[in-house]
Image (spheres, rainbow, N blue to C red):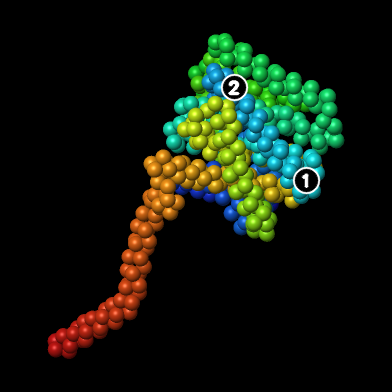
Amino acid sequence: MDGHTLDLTGVAIIVAAAVLFGGVLSRLKQPAIVGYIITGVALGPTGFGLIENADYIGALAELGVLMLLFIVGMELSLKAFMREIGPASLVAGGQIAAALLISFGFGVALGWPAGQALVLAFIVALSSTAVAIRMLEDIGELRTHTGEITIAVLIAQDIAIVPMLIIIDSLGAGTPLGFGVALKIFAAIAFLYLLIRVLSRRGKLRLPGTGAIAGRSDLVALSALAACFGAAALSGLIGLSPAYGAFVAGLVVANSTLRAEAVRVSEPIQSVLIVVFFLSIGLLIDLRYILDNLALVFFFVLGVIVVKTLFNLFLLKSAGQRWEQAFPAALMMAQIGEFSFVLAGAGAANGALDAEAYKLAIAVIAISLLVSPIWMISIRRFHEVAKAGVTDFRLALAQVYADEIHDFETGTQKMKRTTRHIVWRARALPRMRRIRKARLAAAREESLTEQAVK
């Protein structure tokens, strides 16, 4: 019992710390998920060790993945997606092809097995839907064409997770990538495509039992959870990924008369599971591995972000997007996505990734998520300065970080004043004590003198 009590206490402390730190970063206009990841790293097994075994957090995180895909499906505007399905499919396919080319190139140079190179390519190809949506909201682009094309590409990537997981599972099972695997992938994608086509052309569905639960927030929430996890379980039983079933369930609910109410009541559940999911990512990061391989991790993180940005920009321009739309979209898809953790976990579980490759993948994914908001803000500022006609790099740098430099200088001045005040107080304190003692002594002597006179 003591062990369980200690585990629950540790979980309670680390979740509270994550929520607190995430709230602080939100106040500073940074993504809260960065705070969740940092908290997990700091308090996890390779940090202060408040939690030594993150397996039970990881189990909750997997539920978070299912719920996240369910919410993505529910919030997807099929009509907007169908308008952008051509360029979105082209960009997503190009991202995967480029990742495969680069990963297999590294594989040949470093002697990686083909299966490991394949899994790493899939991991790198994906971008973070959660981070991109938050950044789109922050810059007011979520409902613009830039937001639509970005979300469409991210949804195409989410759909691509299905064949990726099927392929990774077949690697672990020792099944050759032959006709059977290809048929399963084709069936999954064909069904999803037909479902999207049908749902986008008809009105709202009236699901069975809608009349009985409409207006009852508790029943709507439970029904949404049942739809999510029930479809996930069915998908897993027929040999597909549970994430596929959760996403399909979200699409169906999104095109039903319960959509608005289901989205509203599911948001608190989603928020809790997102905290747990990104916290578990931080707990999985091996801090000692990063410190021992700092140059390697830094090289891969920088390479992934820069190369993905350039490839995204090229692919979006090739798909007919204008510069002012392609540039922010390319930046928002530069990081590696949260679902890449699912692929990394699947690859490690079936032996497609060895221990070192798994640690490297987790570190690179997490750090890319951490630095992506900074990358996004910095590059957008450079772009705005360049449009204003500033060509000198030092002057551009000064203008890009003018606010931060001003805040730093202001904070430095306040710190200097505070330090001077503390030093003055420290020096004056002994003198003030001597004066106080002298006054007390004089008062006592005067009192004794008055008593003697009386």
Please indicate whether residue 326 sits to the left or right of residue 178 in the image: left
Image location of residue 142, percent across then percent down? 47, 30
Rendered residue at 57%/27% (across/down): 319
Task: Give the residue at mark 2.
Answer: 85
Mark 1, residues whose alpha carbon is within 10 Å: few (<14), some, or many (≥20)?
Answer: few
Image location of residue 424, percent across then percent down? 32, 73
Task: Give the residue at mark 1.
Answer: 108
Residue at the extreme top of the image, as rendered: 202
For this rendering, which residue is in front, 22 or 397? 397
| Amino acid residing under circle 2 | Ile
In this orientation, does residue 27 appear?
A: no
For residue 386, above or below residue 444: above
Image quarter for residue 151? top right
If the image is split into quadrants, where does the C terminus sit? Answer: bottom left
For residue 192, above or below residue 406: above
Rendered residue at 53%/49% (across/down): 17
| Amino acid residing under circle 1 | Val
Please indicate whether residue 176 sits to the left or right of residue 306 in the image: right
Mark 2, residues whose alpha carbon is within 10 Å: few (<14), some, or many (≥20)?
Answer: some
Image location of residue 347, percent across then percent down? 75, 40
Rendered residue at 80%/41% (across/down): 114
Rendered residue at 63%/27% (across/down): 90
For this rendering, which residue is in front, 277 or 417? 417
> CA gap, disc 1 to disc 2?
34 Å
